[in-house]
Image (cartoon, helix red, strand yellow):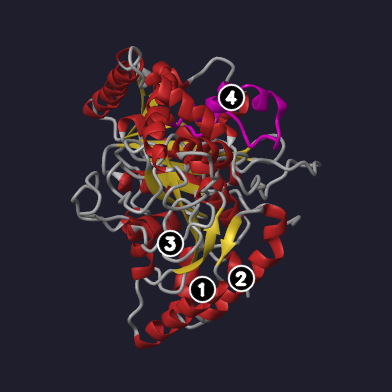
Amino acid sequence: MTELTKLSLADARKGLKDKSFTALELTEAYIGAIDAANDKLNAYVATTPDQARDMAKASDAKLAKGEAGLLEGIPLGVKDLFATKGVHTQAASHILDGFKPEYESTVTANLWRDGAVMLGKLNMDEFAMGSSNETSYYGSVINPFRAEGSNANLVPGGSSGGSASAVAAWLCAGATATDTGGSIRQPAAFTGTVGIKPTYGRCSRWGTVAFASSLDQAGPIARTVEDAALMLQSMSGFDVKDSTSVDLAVPDFAAAVERGVKGLTIGVPREYRMDGMPSEIEALWNQGLEWLKAEGATVKDISLPHTKYALPAYYIVAPAEASSNLARYDGVKYGLRVSGKDITDLYELTRAAGFGREVKRRIMIGTYVLSAGYFDAYYVKAQKVRTLIKKDFEDAFNAGVDAVLTPATPSAAFAIGDEALAADPVAMYLNDVFTVTVNMAGLPGIAVPAGKDGKGLPLGLQLIGKPFDEETLFAAARVIEKSTGTDFSPTRWW
């Protein structure tokens, strides 16, 4: 029989239902895999094996009674941004040292309601600020993929790098993640996994540590399109505790996966054909379009004229909101406290010791653009640009486009400690060039593995959809998934 940890989430559900194995056996297999691999991959910052076993036993009891929930007995990893009651929740930051909340995030509560099993908390860029998972207080996450003929460690992408690495390396059946500017889709592309950022408001943000409140959205990273659909179905739903949560019924996302793309119009934005784009990325994009056309879709060139302003506008809006959100971390009520001669000194010393370099950089940028004399010139103008970006997409959808196809990233995964990127933060920010528009416009976007580069590393394509039309994205992504005919499993070295 296939190793239990190598089953897709959907196949694991079927095996549990057919009584081919128990939820406890499945959970034990994942606990063993984590114990064997985590020292090398650094995907988990905290594990909860005893809690996982108790949850699995409860699932076996429900399965025996025929009372299984949507994800009954399925072992999942949780990004360290989601509050989990009584369990390490630190956003991979030293400033939240020792914090264990007395409450559960809505997203994780929904998963446990549906029978999922928690394996532990996953590593990430500190406060979700990063594109490589190198800013974590707990150290860099390692991508399970390596370039052919090389032993060099690669980044898994960020900020949800622990989620992507754990899913790709068979250390959980699926994982929660968050996406503020590409933090689900970029890591998914770098690790040969599927990641969807749903429409803003589809998943509750309550109990999720905030980075930029108007951009943050939870979503899953999984091994297949169907797995991602099943997870999103459980994670979604209206929540009265979140004023940005939208009161819409959650569709049967899994039922839409095999719907196909016949009759759909796929937009191709000319502004995404960047100067200097690697030929491999261009070829992959064209191949994706051919696959969709072969299944009955029509391809249409479109213009999203304000795309070139998206990245600079994003890096004003996101740090501004971060500087406001992170003001609450002061060493007074919870987390790290570094004592000083007075309260102001306590604030300064705690923040200096508790926040990492990238977080400090973004707080300073955000505080600057919100300061007197600069607010209108930067933050207000960036919000106006954001409105124009959103209108670009609305115009395309109103002109008959059902979804937009673009590359997910400008390259495959790069080396940990890349000197050029370490020396130039702006170069690192450019990893989000294809993804930030989706957050700025509040739209759904999915990354699906579509090919490999010349060194055997995964490359992904991105589909962008209409608001609350994740079903079309799942259907189109499934067409690409079936058309690739490629195994996106890493060669085990850990």
Q: Earlier in the sequence, mark 1 or mark 3?
A: 1
Percent across and percent down for residue 418 are: 70, 30
Do the CB atoms of the residues marked 1 and 3 lie less than 8 Å apart? no
Question: Which residue is under mark 3?
Answer: 84
> Distance from label 1 to label 2 (Cα)?
9 Å
Residue 140 horizontal/vertical position (percent): 65, 45
Q: Identity of the amino acid at label 2?
A: Ile
Pointers 3 and 4 in contact (CB under 8 A)? no
For disc 3, the neighbor class at 10 Å (few under 14, some 14 to 19, many from 20) is: many
Which sits earlier in the primary sequence, circle 2 or circle 3?
2
Task: Residue type at mark 3: give it.
Answer: Thr
Q: Which residues are magenta?
A: 407-435
Check disc 2 and report the residue beneath it.
31
Q: Quadrant of the N terminus?
A: bottom right
- Calculate the distance from the C-alpha at mark 1 to the C-alpha at mark 4: 39 Å
Total labels: the figure holds: 4
Question: Who's the residue at 48% across and 64% down the image?
Answer: 87
Element on which disc 4 rests: helix
Q: Please name whichever residue, 342 or 157, is drawn nearer the observer in this view of the structure.
A: 342
Residue under numbered circle 1: 52
Give the amino acid type for the residue marked by disc 4 in the picture. Pro
The front one of 55 and 167 is 55
Disc number for residue 134: none
**197 lies above or below 371:** below
